[in-house]
Image (cartoon, helix red, strand yellow):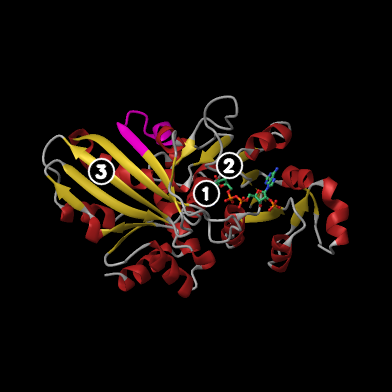
Amino acid sequence: MVKLFINGYGNIGRRLATAFNLDSQVDLIGIAKYKADERAKEAILKGYRIFIPQSLEQEFKNNKLEFTGFIEEAIKKSDIVIDASKEGLGFNNKQKFYLPMKKRAIFQGGEDSEGKYSVADIIHNSRVNYDKVVDKSYVIQGSCNVSGMGRVIQPLIDHFGDRITRYDVTLIRRWADLEDLTEVKDSIQWDKNPHHQDDVHNFIPDINLFVDAYKVPSRMMHLHQMSIRFRDKTPTKNEILEIFSKEFGVVILNGAKGTAEIRKKALDMGFAHGDTNMIHIHEEVMRTQDDVLKISYSDDQTGMVIPENHLLVQSLIFKKPRKKALAYTDKIFELSKKKKILQEEFK
Ligand SMILES: NC(=O)c1ccc[n+]([C@@H]2O[C@H](COP(=O)([O-])OP(=O)(O)OC[C@H]3O[C@@H](n4cnc5c(N)ncnc54)[C@H](OP(=O)(O)O)[C@@H]3O)[C@@H](O)[C@H]2O)c1
């Protein structure tokens, strides 16, 4: 069994813990908490072993929060760490723990793959470079937006690569996650240098891609509008839908009025953490005109990257062929079942 430690227990860390706790190939050593708060209580109630910085020992004791040990001990015991820390802290963790302790680590999409603060030179996307991460010590799992773009672009490349001349993507990003206490401001904010474009170039280097990103006052998923320009006339809408109907982690929906409706369905159906773990292509707003195909899809911000991290572990650690890994990840996350439920609701 592989010993895995999750360093961070926020939006992503909590979901990773739920998933890896169900995985019989993995011994979940525990999770790290950096605050003696309600989330620490939640983790204890869920039965996870909690590891903390030594400096918080007294605070945890004063608050009667049981912990198993200190973070260094957990990392020492582990074969691999999934770092789910706040954006940018993964770099410090690598310097402080993973490098000196010679531990392999997976980082999240908020970390850099280039420059002074780079933590790894490869960004993983299970649809694009699943098996390129084998034997790497450090890998970044692409962010939700970047994972979603890979999931849409790679099937298009596979089928029409030499006919496509450029991709223009507008990312309409949610302001905060459902569980965040952050205030959602009544404003539309632009990003003057979205990291998503460079991140996609990391795993599809020769793509002609332009990304714009806007943050809107919502907690309910991201929406991407992708315009794909062909050299000649585009394929038909039915041809495109047929291709995506066979893709893992992609569902085609018809008739949803917006992202909140899909999220609400996921919550009502009791999907873990209210996640669909997918992208949802919205059939009614897919358009073809002359040489341009427009695809709009919503992207389950927090849920998307959890099966991606799971697949990354299947590749990095277990060296499983992609097909086998997809079947196993599907079993853990019940993606096929969720897909059917959503298709039935929005048809
Ligand atoms: N949220 C999303 O939708 C989303 C989607 C895809 C990727 N990501 C990426 O995933 C990463 C985590 O995002 P998040 O939304 O989960 O953030 P978050 O909710 O703010 O959680 C961050 C966690 O980091 C913990 N932490 C604090 N100091 C740490 C340290 N030195 N080392 C490790 N953990 C530490 C915090 O612990 P305490 O709570 O105990 O203080 C908190 O649990 C980021 O890189 C982000 O870009 C996020």
Q: Which residue is mark 3?
A: 227
Direction from residue 294 to residue 178 in the image, left or right: right
Cα separation between marks 3 and 1: 28 Å
Depth check: 29 or 252 in front? 252
Q: Which residue is mark 1?
A: 309
Q: Which residue is mark 2?
A: 106
- Residue 244 visible, this angle: yes
Task: Provide residue 276's location: percent of width, then percent of height.
Answer: 44, 62
User: Which residue corresponds to the image point at 39% horizontal and 32% vertical from the top-left?
Assistant: 201
Q: Secondary structure at mark 3?
A: strand
Determine whether label 2 and label 1 are within 8 Å by CB.
yes
Task: Provide residue 144's location: percent of width, then percent of height.
Answer: 46, 48
Crowding at label 2, few (<14), some or many (≥20) Cα neighbours within 10 Å? many
Task: Provide residue 327's location: percent of width, then percent of height.
Answer: 42, 57
Query: Residue flagged by tag 3: what amino acid is it?
Result: Ser
Q: Secondary structure at mark 1?
A: helix
Cα separation between marks 2 and 3: 32 Å
